[in-house]
Amino acid sequence: MPRCDLGRGNDQGVVGHDGAASTRLPDGSVLFVFGDTLLGTIRGDRRRVTGLISSSGALLPAAADVCSGRLRYLTDARGAVRPLLPSAGRGTASWPVDVTVLDGRVWMLYRLVAATGTVDEAGFRILGTGLAVADPDRLAFRPAARLLVTGDDVVPAALFGDQAMGRLRTVVCGDGSGPCRAGVVDRGALRLRATRPGSPAAWLTDPVHLTRWGATAVSWAKLPRRLGALWRLAATPGLGCRLRVATGPAPDQPLRSAPPIALPRRPGAACYAGRVQEALSRPGRTVVTWVDSRTGPTGTRTDARLYWPHVAELRSPP
């Protein structure tokens, strides 16, 4: 099923990463943003890691096939692959969550996390969710001085530019006990706008119960159509290798769920970060990506077949 591993085979010293949110820039190229990015060398199916940055970005030229090998990582003045955001302090990392374009600028949602120093289920805790903005020509992201949300109780999980309304919106999904909600970002102050219940900018309630979607692995998109628009949510609940997709006329309307898509995985690996890549999809061709990794960090680091976003095409939209 997978057509390729996104980024594998590059000549810039990147030997693995996860995530893979994308958006189409004004010049037609596609920007990908990734989470933890491993640097080093690959020989055969073995990986040697010599460095780690908590985020990276790459550009796919306009009209280029996603599996063409033309993906190029963003670099600094010395030509080294660079992180998208500056360090927030020792023991912390900034992981991109979603990215979109609005009013000629590129907006990125990210999670600020800290290592727990313990061998637990995650190994990190979420300190909050922030917003950063960049010019599409330089792609040097500037984070807001304050986080949109602190802590991990209510965390924006998706970001999109509402071109018709000229608004930057987020979608927040809870832990399965509550609904998805949509909110508006104040772009001037780079803060989540506080709204009163019932106002047009208030949080919208989605009737889909999140036990089907999972808490954090979701992506939302607004797809323009000749008559109105179509909204799509995609998620991989937990670490299960199932990509669930639902569509509807608006975030506050019932969503129609398609049967889950089984994602192939290697024995002993866990799947996550599944999403529909709207920037690469078109009618009749839906592009999806997901990542798999070993349950233990050693296998993930040494096995070069793991820790890449796998790319697949679905000929009929879910």
Image (cartoon, rainbow, N blue to C red):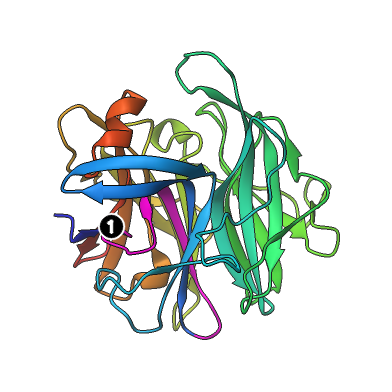
For the question of whether residue 275 can be seen, the reply is yes
Q: Position of residue 175 (x, y in %)?
A: 53, 28
Give the magenta part as a residue range: 7-27
Against 297, is 6 above or below? Answer: below
Give the image quarter of residue 174.
Answer: top right
Number of marks in the rendered image:
1
Q: Residue at x 35, y 84 (%)?
A: 63
Specify the quadrant of the image occupied by residue 177.
top right
Residue at left 16%, top 36%? 266
On whether residue 26 falls in the magenta region, the answer is: yes
Residue 68: x, y in percent? 25, 73
Is 54 a magenta residue? no
Closest to the observer: 86 or 96? 86
Amino acid on which the number 1 mark rests in the picture: Arg
- Tell whether 83 sits left or right of 307: right
Q: Circle 1 — which element? A: loop
Which quadrant holds the N terminus? bottom left
Tell me residue 99's x, y (percent): 56, 61
Residue 133, image x, y percentages: 70, 64
